[in-house]
Image: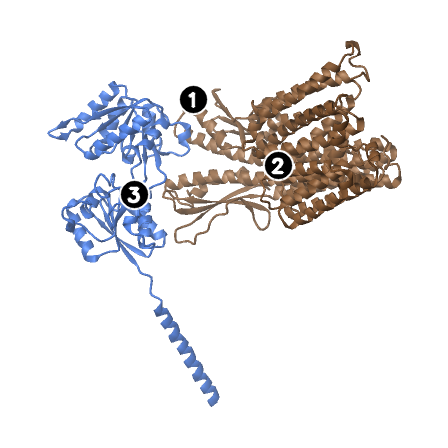
Chain colours: A blue, B brown
Amino acid sequence: MLKICRFGLFLAMAVSLSGVCAVQAQNATPAPKRFTIYMAAWRGCEEACQGFVDYVKESGMPADVVIRDAKTEKTVLPDFVREVKETRPDLVVTWGTTVTAQMIGPYDAADPSKFIGDVPSIFMIVADPVEAKIAKSFESSGRPFVTGTRNRVPEIIQIRAMLEYRPFKRFGIIYNENELNSKLNAEVVKRAADELSLDLVMLPMPLHDGQPDKADIPGLVQEAADRGVEFLYIGSSSFISVNADIYTKAATELGIPVASSYETSVTDSDALLAIASKYGMVGRLAGYQAKRILMDGIKPIDLPIAALDRHSYIINMAAAAALKLYPPMTLLSYAEIVHQPGKN
Amino acid sequence: MAGVRVRTVAGRLAFLMTVAIFCAITLAVVDGLGRRAVEARLAQSLDAIASAYQSSAEASLDYGLPVNGPGSVESILRPPAVLTDGADGLSLRLERQSAADPRREPVSAPTRDQSGSMVVAERTILDSHGEVSARLILSRSTTGLNEDFRARERALAFGLAGLVILTAGLLLALPPARVLLWPAILFLPATALLLASFGSQLVDISRQAAQLAVADTSSDLARAAQLGIPFEQLVGMQDYLRQQVSSNPAIGRMELSGPSGIAFAAAGDGLGSAVTDLLVASPQSYLLSDFVVEQRLESGVTLRAAVNIQPVLADLMMPVLVSLVLCIAFGAALWVLFVDRVEHAMKLSSALASPALFFCLLFLVFGLQLGASQMDRHWQAWLVAASAAVGFLIPLRLAIPTLMAALAIVALGLWGDAAMLLAGAGLCCGLGLARSPLVLKPVHLAASLLPSVGLLSVWLFDLMPSGPSAKAVVVLLAVLVVPVVRAAGRSTAGQAEATGAGSFAGLATRRAASLFFWLCLFVLQTSGYLLLVIAALRAQGGLPGQYGQSVYLLLCVLLFLLGNQAAARFAHASRLRWILCEICVFGVVLLTAWSHVGDGNLFVTSAIAAMLMGGIAHWTASQSFVRAHETMARSVNAGVGLLAFAVAVSIALSLGEPSSGALPAILLFLAAFAPLAFATIAGLGAPVGRMFSRGSAS
């Protein structure tokens, strides 16, 4: 009996000892570090922001995304900067040119202390990060803690896509000389037109006290029609983008198709087509950049300003029907059609 | 030509057995090659379909559709029901993959699954920034295909048995010499049926791909209709159809006709689409329903696509070439074994060993593999030619020591550089050829191609490692040469001459003038062979498989010998013979120029040219001013022919761009023919009325 008790005692000690060892072994393995990603959104967690969040979730990154919405209010952005400096997240993601300019700031900023500084950051949905002085080039931001994504499709690709829809010899661009972005973009479009041996009619918005007036848009569209323009192109310009309704309606009335670099000109206005990077995909691309920084340990300065490999060809069917300019069959198999008859 | 060995019962039995073995080998080889062609076409077709699905899947994912579930990319891409059911059913699956999943590279080429009843092609689906987001798995059932393979094997066994029984019956009823033709006559339709059954399987595979392309096109048309675009106002239809045809190699032609009679059509480029057009447009097109896929849409639009016949014909090319090569080579072997007047089998095998070894060495250098060597291929061919020429010119008294030395070099070459093996074996060839107890006729040379054909067949099916098997054959043939040289050593020079053996040296001393004409003959044959070798090298892209070039060259050589043999039928009408010879020369020049400079089909024109060249070689070599002695001339002609072939292979292999040698070869062919033509015309003095008379002087 005593032997049995001794054996039982020995067994109990052995079991408890092994249990202690197992617990110690478990304690010895450090829990995987969870990262904190601070997302500064401009107008809620829309497609790009959602694409980023989805990517983080699907990729299995041990990260929590903290979303802060500016609700299109510039005034809250300094508060975001303060919060970042206090909480020091592992990564900051900024949405849009305004948020990025206010939080990351230009590389030649006079007072760097106004910005988030040495916290790694990724920007997305910035039309031209080089022009906005966020990055020094597309190959690298040239800034130790900054990288990002770009969503603008190169102009030459956009013009080729227009040609694929309908061959033309002369096209026009209405641009805002008051916006540096727009002015520079018009020059890029001119170079692309020359490369493709096309005539480009350049129509700058007249300035009244240094400001463009949307009332001038229909007149410029009429002038384009008078000069034999077969296609109109909306390049980079916040002013034109905001007034795309007026622009595209005037063009449709005159039977001129409009191609836009803004997806919204097709989805929300009457532009015929757009070659765009889908925001959801851009968000996922930013997620991929985040993974490379947090999981692969790559420094932001060593990452290029990433762009998507594929773009979306978006066709406005209502505009096509109004213009009696149906898309060619070669495009129908892969284009994304919006405003289909009988839908939305 | 009485069949000496088929007169006895044992001889007839041996004949029957040989016929059965040759037929069985040919059918098995053609069946194996056809099966391989079908499997390769299936893999290629599945690969192309998977690639098409890959781009569609990536585009659909860009729209933001989910990978699986209702309204997913997987459900959109699913093949139409008509293609998913049955023994050849297709199935498509998409597996979601995230960055967190362990990375698994997809297999690069379609593979059979473990049960062997499915072929699977895989593709990775990348998202728009290049990360793997899903895996596409496309599989096709091979149950129907396997069933067809088994049914064909049964039919082959029955067919072979029937062939043997029929031949046995014929052997009882007919004189033996006549029986020889019957297996060939019966065998050809059997081979044709076999090839036709492969063709039918290949068409089925192409038809499945065509059905998918038609379904894809009809879904685009349905989308256009859904978007409210009237059929009459469809934009860019011609470009679209052209794009559909060019991106789907299985389709040769596609046409579309609307309810109001408006029609669009597009056809691919090349011979295949022209043949398809002819087939579809012919009044008997209903017999070719397998070639046409038709679909009628709800909108009243009819979509019609014709299967592209060109890939099917290309796939059948290798089995056709091999079956031709085997038929001719085995036919020649049967003739030599059972009809020729050589009574001792040992003597026969020894006599044929030298040319067999020579051909083997050249084909090993040309496209097969012998072993590692520091020497370039064209130098290896020169080495074979030079060592054979040296062996040919060695005096009789030195023949035995030279043979011993040659065999020693062969033995060293087995473990050393392959060039040594070539040199030693080449020397054996020369020694054997110069002392052959047999006047080498084209049929002997055709039969002596059998070892090369055998090696090629063994390698086509990977039955044995290439290097060791090639070395074994070379050594065996070199050993077989020994009895010929030993027997010649024991006989006198006068006896040797009486049996027809000759040498260049003897010929030159007796009639110096004829040497010039022999030189012309050599140049003529070299340039002719050069054109054939160039054709085989240029045909690289069009011939499937590693050994395609060698098979084609073998066929050309056999056709050359066939032409040579056929030309002997006109032995007595010298003027007709010469007219035919001149016509053949023009034919060769026109055909080769058309294929090398114009857009003639290289395979077909070169094969026809090979036969014509064979005839020219025979007729030019049988002119009175060339031949010092009838039988000796034949022997020397065979030697010149073999040497010319070796030199042609050497030259062709040394050309950086094979096609650059075509024009000089044509010019050389004409230049070498000119003195022969001049001498013949000068010597033809008979009246026109006697032009076609038998035995007129030449």
Distance Cα–Cα, label 3 vs label 1: 49 Å
| Of marks 3 and 1, the one in the foreground | 3
- In the image, residue B341 lies at what x, y percent? 84, 34
Single out the residue that lies furthest toward the right.
Answer: B8
For disc 1, the marked residue is B232
- Labels 3 and 1 share a subunit: no
- Labels 2 and 3 share a subunit: no
Distance Cα–Cα, label 2 vs label 3: 49 Å
In terms of depth relative to the viewer, which is nearer, A174 or B341?
Answer: B341
Q: Output the chain of dot 3.
A: A
Residue sitting at x 21%, y 23%: A220
Judge from the rendering whether residue A193 lies leftward or rightward of residue B467; answer left or right: left
- In the image, residue B124 lies at what x, y percent? 45, 45
Q: Amino acid at mark 3?
A: Glu
Q: Secondary structure at mark 1?
A: helix
Judge from the rendering whether residue B633 lies leftward or rightward of residue B130; answer left or right: right
Q: Which quadrant holds residue B146?
A: top right
Residue A139 has which mark? 3
